[in-house]
Image (cartoon, grey):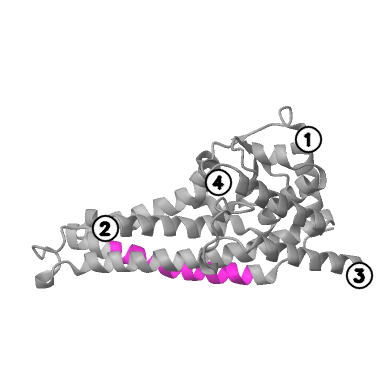
Amino acid sequence: MRLKPDWSLRVRMVLAMAGMAVLYAAFVGVAAWWATDAMGSAGFVLVVGVAGVLVTLQYKYAPAAALKALDAERVDETEYPDLHARVGRLAAQAGIPKPDVAVAPQAQPNAFATAKGRDDAVVAVTQGMLDTLQGDELDAVLAHEIAHVEHRDALVMSVVTFLVTAAAMVVRNFWWFGDGGGDGAGGGDGGMPWFLAFVAISLVAWIGGYLVSRAISRHREFAADRGAAVITGKPGAMAAAIETISTEMAATPDEDLRDHAELNALFIVPADAKSRLVSAMQTHPDPEKRVERLSELAGEFERA
């Protein structure tokens, strides 16, 4: 069965990218103001040039960076023949080219997809996932990640995450960006307004991007759950996989994937599943809600 376009997700992604473009422009604009104040026109050129290079590098290397953060390595068919066969079969059912396959050494069961496009994607699973799930449940998880590739939402999440990370670095280390305004350099008698504006817009970008990423990541998980059910024809297997992963993750040590919680938005189940935060701060919908929706979908399949 082929996946149908998820227009709700597409609209959300377009709105998210539009909002992030505004935040990017504000963030770079104030940084350019700061640099121009300090170095003249050369500062403006420098900031704009660096921003352009960073955006290009982000698009080009974001998938590799996500894999490297988890020590995940691409594997070939001779090493993991069954895993490759499953990914190839499910990708064909979804109507997309077969993604590369990667395995991470963590004991926690989890998976994620990273991609620049449907023709350049990687589906990664942890060793814990391969040790925990088999058969239809493993297929459901792989189909979930393939649905992310088909929906093209992995790239959107990498763009949002990049700005959030950059803005957070400015806010957390703001004292490195000025001398506190004591001599009024570049800011007149009032100190350094460019510095205050830079920190303020960074804080707005951090909070705004953070909330946007949470809203998009939650919706894209529902969409990928549905996509997995459509690809495999077995929504019950997806529901069972979510329950199994959530239970196993709560039983693993606090280290492991929780050391990489900044990548939560990419995982099929968040690595900090033990501690549930307020709804607005969660990267994923509650497992119970995901299972409930999949149960409703199973009813739709039975009536179809």
Q: Residue furthest top?
A: 78
Kindly indicate whether the residue at mark 2 contacts the one at mark 1 (C-beta within 8 angstroms): no
**First in residue order: circle 2 vs circle 4:** 4
**First in residue order: circle 3 vs circle 2:** 2
Q: CA distance from mark 3 to mark 2?
A: 58 Å
**First in residue order: circle 3 vs circle 4:** 4
Q: Is residue 2 above or below residue 104?
A: below
Q: Nearer the viewer, residue 147 or 96?
A: 147
Q: CA distance from mark 1 to mark 3?
A: 33 Å
Residue at x 22%, y 56% (from the top left corner)? 175
Q: Residues within 10 Å of mark 4 (few under 14, many from 20)?
A: many
**What range of the chain is rendered magenta?**
10-31
In the drawing, what numbered circle is on residue 251? none
Q: Is residue 189 above or below residue 159?
A: below
Q: Residue furthest front?
A: 251
Q: Amino acid at mark 3?
A: Arg
Q: Nearer the viewer, residue 221 or 255?
A: 255
Image location (x, y in percent) of residue 54 = 41, 51
Q: What residue is pinned by disc 2?
A: 174
Residue at x 42%, y 55% (from the top left corner)? 165
In the drawing, what numbered circle is on residue 303? 3
Q: What residue is pinned by disc 1?
A: 82
Q: CA distance from mark 3 to mark 4?
A: 40 Å
Q: Amino acid at mark 1?
A: Asp
**Along the horizontal axis of the image, is 263 left or right of 134?**
left
